[in-house]
Image: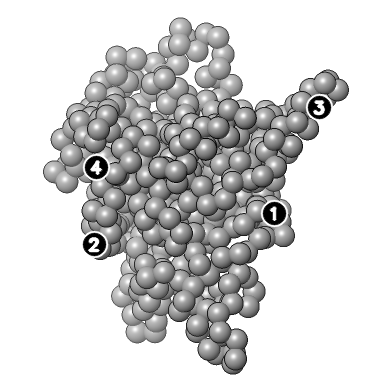
Amino acid sequence: ESYLARIQQTEPHIRSFLHISNSVIKEAEELDRKIERNEELGPLAGVFVGVKDNICTANMPSTGGSKVLEGYRPPFDATAVRRVKECGGIIVGKTNLDEFGMGSTTEGSAFQVTANPWDVSRVPGGSSGGSAAAVSAGQCVVSLGSDTGGSVRQPASFCGVVGIKPTYGRVSRYGLMAYASSLDAIGCFGSSVVDTGILLHAISGHDQLDATTSKREVPDFTSQCTSASFFESKPLKGLRVGVIRETLDDGVDGAIKSSIYEAAAHLEELGCNVTEVSLPSFSLGLPAYYILALSESSSNLSRYDGIRYGNQIGADELNSLYGDSRAKGFGSEVKLRILMGTYALSAGYYDAYYKRAQQVRTLIQRSFKDALDKNDILISPAAPSTAYSIGEKKNDPLAMYAGDIMTVNVNLAGLPALVLPCGVVEGGSNGLPVGLQIIGAAFDEAKLLKVGHIFE
Ligand code: GLN
């Protein structure tokens, strides 16, 4: 009830949710009965979980932030949602996003603009802005988002919460609306590293319904953090930390650089071996990402034909049914991306764009491998700026894309990365949070969470 009251009080100015469940009290009462009956409770028993609206939930709308899916109620739960429920979590509602995850501000939602709880005149980041704002505003305990090029990490940074993007293949994508299938990952938000790790643990692991999930065992990511002797045991002694040089160049706000250097100094005090490391192909990540993500999206979004799901517009004749449903259903950013992706994949341009971007992707994977052979973790800012004003980049898509520079390389390499608040700098009415990004080798989520927990 206290969470519902909090939602009622904050939602008019934050607008995190596209849909709020009407069964949470009933589910909580069911949990009370379980407690009375002394039944075993799951690790998320009674925990309020927000779910990004591009992740399918049975009996709740799932729109992907798009008019093309208005009114769509999937007949099934995404695997991640099913696992949250099996662990006792209560799905409080569906959170706002840029249409199909395409954007960095949440202004690209077809339905509403979400505000940043630190300063309501600013964006919460995106595309999982609703999930980040909901945790930041205390509307739910943890939430699920998706991260194709930074959509969990950048909003976590803008809203001053913790966000993790797991290794590609750690969490099932079954029931996640595909944006760019080779990059998409479901990730988690929380107000602490441990909360975030517990949610990630609940949703991780092999799934028969997603052939790209790994069969590796899922360790208890946070058991070390919660042991009583964690801080005394000097858990970071000798850890090799690489500060990525290219992420701290002239394009980054001075105050952000200072916060990252302070975090590096703190790690050094704790016994880490901190050095600077170079990722030579770093700056190629952004163009390669936008070619690959848009190419994949142009193919993935062809399923929205007005027949199989959601909104059907115009029905006289088959071709106009497809055409009208897509023309009226998709927003302008989505159409722009479908056009660019289709162009990059077309005969005659494929070699120049798509194939070349795949080659760059291999270079990026190799340079991460080199850096992570010499270091246990890499650190960088999560974004080149703090949260900017609503409307500031709305008509300048290139400026918005440029803001993804810190995060897209990690998706191209399929690696896990954690973002956590590492300082507050001047700006807005109450100061604005800065996010530290910690990148690790594939399947090394536990290490990232251990390092992150040191900062709490
Ligand atoms: N901002 C990036 C994009 O628009 C990343 C989005 C995401 O991770 N879903 O593609």
Please provide percent x and percent y for residue 58.
69, 54
Please provide percent x and percent y for residue 215.
65, 45
Q: Secondary structure at mark 1?
A: loop
Can residue 381 be seen here? The reply is yes
What amino acid type should be assigned to the residue bearing mark 3? Answer: Lys
Disc number lying in front (3 or 4):
3
Residue 34: which numbered mark, if any?
3
Q: Secondary structure at mark 2?
A: loop
Q: Earlier in the sequence, mark 3 or mark 2?
A: 3
Q: In the figure, 51 relative to 65: above or below?
A: above
What is the total number of numbered labels drawn onto the structure image? 4
Q: Name the residue: 45% across, 22% down.
A: 453
Q: CA distance from mark 1 to mark 2?
A: 37 Å
Relative placement, left or right, of 209 versus 49 is right
Q: Earlier in the sequence, mark 4 or mark 2?
A: 4
What amino acid type should be assigned to the residue bearing mark 2? Answer: Asp
Q: Are marks 3 and 1 in contact (CB under 8 Å)?
A: no
